Image (cartoon, rainbow, N blue to C red):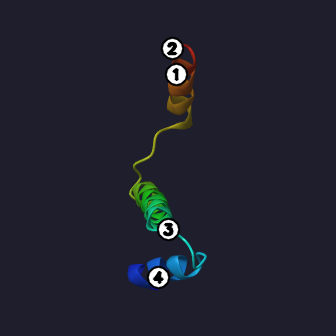
Amino acid sequence: MTTKEKVLERIQALPDDVGIEEIRDRLTFILGVQEAMDSVERGETIPKDSVKGMIKGWATQ
């Protein structure tokens, strides 16, 4: 399935009265997930222990 087909399928699944902002938000979310999945496939991940340290740092700010 092409990217265009996937996007059209997602839009078709939305209610008929959906607003353009909701469509934009859904597509932005889908793009973000796809970019994250692509990063994982390229091996561009952060080790779990590093993430734990980042979260601890945020919690103490």
Q: Residue at 40% across / 58% down in the picture?
A: 35
Distance from Cα at disc 3 to Cα at disc 2: 38 Å
Q: Earlier in the sequence, mark 4 or mark 1?
A: 4
User: What type is the residue that disc 2 sits on?
Assistant: Gln
Find the distance from the CA under tag 3 to the CA under tag 4: 15 Å
Dot 2 crowding, Cα within 10 Å, few <14, some 14–19, many 20+: few
Residue 24: assigned label: none
Closer to the chain start, of discs 1 and 3, is: 3
Percent from the top left, x then y, of residue 51?
52, 32
Residue 27 location (% of width, % of height) = 45, 65
Taking the view exactly as shown, the residue that stands out farthest to the top is 60
Give the amino acid type for the residue marked by disc 1 in the picture: Trp
Residue for point 55% across, 13% down: 60
Q: Can you identify the residue that label 4 sits on?
A: 8
Q: Earlier in the sequence, mark 3 or mark 4?
A: 4
Name the residue rendered at 54%, 82% in the picture: 12
Q: Which residue is mark 1?
A: 58
Relative depth, front residue between 60 and 50: 60
Three-letter amino acid code of the residue under disc 4: Leu
Q: Which mark is residue 19?
A: 3
Give the CA distance from mark 1 to mark 2.
5 Å
Dot 4: what SS? helix
Spatial separation of the CA atoms under disc 1 and disc 3: 35 Å
Closer mark to the observer between disc 1 and disc 3: 3
Q: Earlier in the sequence, mark 3 or mark 2?
A: 3
Q: Nearer the viewer, residue 19 or 57?
A: 19
User: On residue 61, which mark appears?
Assistant: 2
Name the side, left or right, on which 43 lies relative to 19: left
Q: Residue at x 51, y 77 (%)?
A: 11
- Disc 3 on helix, strand or loop? loop
Mark 4–mark 2 CB contact (< 8 Å): no
